[in-house]
Image (cartoon, grey):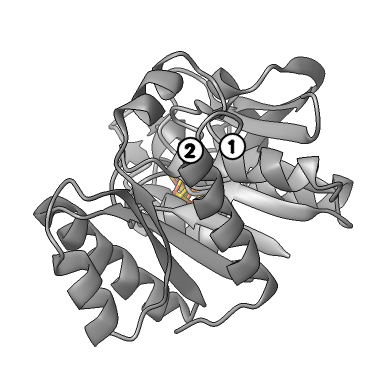
Amino acid sequence: MKLTIASGKGGTGKTTISTNLTSLIADMGKNIVLTDLDVEEPNSALFLQTKLSNTKISNKIVPTWESNDCTLCGKCAKNCNFNAIVAMPNEILIFPELCHSCYACSELCPTNSLLMKPTRIGEIKEFETKNFPFIEGRLDLGQEMAVPLISQSIRYTKEKYKNHIMIFDAPPGTSCPVIEASRGSDFVILVTESTPFGLNDLKLAVETMRVLDKNFGVIINRYGIGEISVEEYCLKENIPIITKVKNDKNIAKLYSKGELIYKQIDHFKNSLDEIITFIGDIKCVK
Ligand code: SF4
Ligand code: SF4
């Protein structure tokens, strides 16, 4: 089973759910791996006692300009859909951060002056924790394109842990990174909170999942702080509410200390048990 835990916005408790759920399932004797795909700002490791076991450099392929035969025709710049190449009067400028590695410029260059070469964008790190392997993708400072590193981190996880339950902690939002983190999964859990902001972002996330034709359900976190509009929306849209995690300042205290919560707060563990039961008996919408 491949499970992605996502949310329409940051700060809903997605990482709290991911780390605690993975650890609880590992405690039950299951083979499980957690991968933090929030590559711009991974933070799952803050809640786990980790020991680094492997590091892999992550590259993407970008063009490099060989000036010798270039006629400065400008065809490369005209054909780049991502504005990653600019043709100047005397040179060709390449902006690797904008490049989507589509090869169009290199293929279309009449003089073979654009060679595609690997360039570093970040790292995939693997750690041991007390009870499960943990993988983290981390973009280098200044790098903007999360998708290649997300897809490489997923591939690394699948190749190395193909017989494990895989939990992917997605980046927040509804754009390309979360789509990449969700599209290969069997099920997506959307974590939200019962506030107008939570509802607004949940609606966007639901639209995204429906476009992707994904099976998904919702966890309402910090249940009780706001209103019931999230529940009403889920009911109206026939979206399963997997669990409601009670609002409890003791959860926030443990979170701020970087501690796992299910070991100390019973109602939180009960919510995780509900998620595990749901996963074992998935009822879902598309
Ligand atoms: S397409 Fe090739 S020859 Fe034309 S400007 Fe670009 S690099 Fe130079
Ligand atoms: S590989 Fe594609 S995205 Fe990158 S510079 Fe060339 S045309 Fe643009």
* Quadrant housing residue 165: bottom right
Which quadrant would the N terminus be assigned to in this image?
bottom right
Crowdedness near tag 1: few (<14), some (14–19) or many (≥20) residues, C-alpha within 10 Å: many
- What residue does disc 1 label? 19
Which quadrant would the C terminus be assigned to in this image?
bottom left
Q: Helix, strand, or loop for circle 1?
A: helix
Amino acid under disc 1:
Thr
The label on residue 15 is: 2
Q: Residue at x 12, y 58 (%)?
A: 227
Seen in the picture, residue 104 relative to 231 is either above or below; the reply is above
Which one is nearer the viewer's eye here, 243 or 140? 243
Amino acid under disc 2:
Thr
Image location (x, y in percent) of residue 93? 38, 30
Which one is nearer the viewer's eye here, 74 or 261? 261
* Quadrant housing residue 21: top right
Image location (x, y in percent) of residue 131? 81, 32
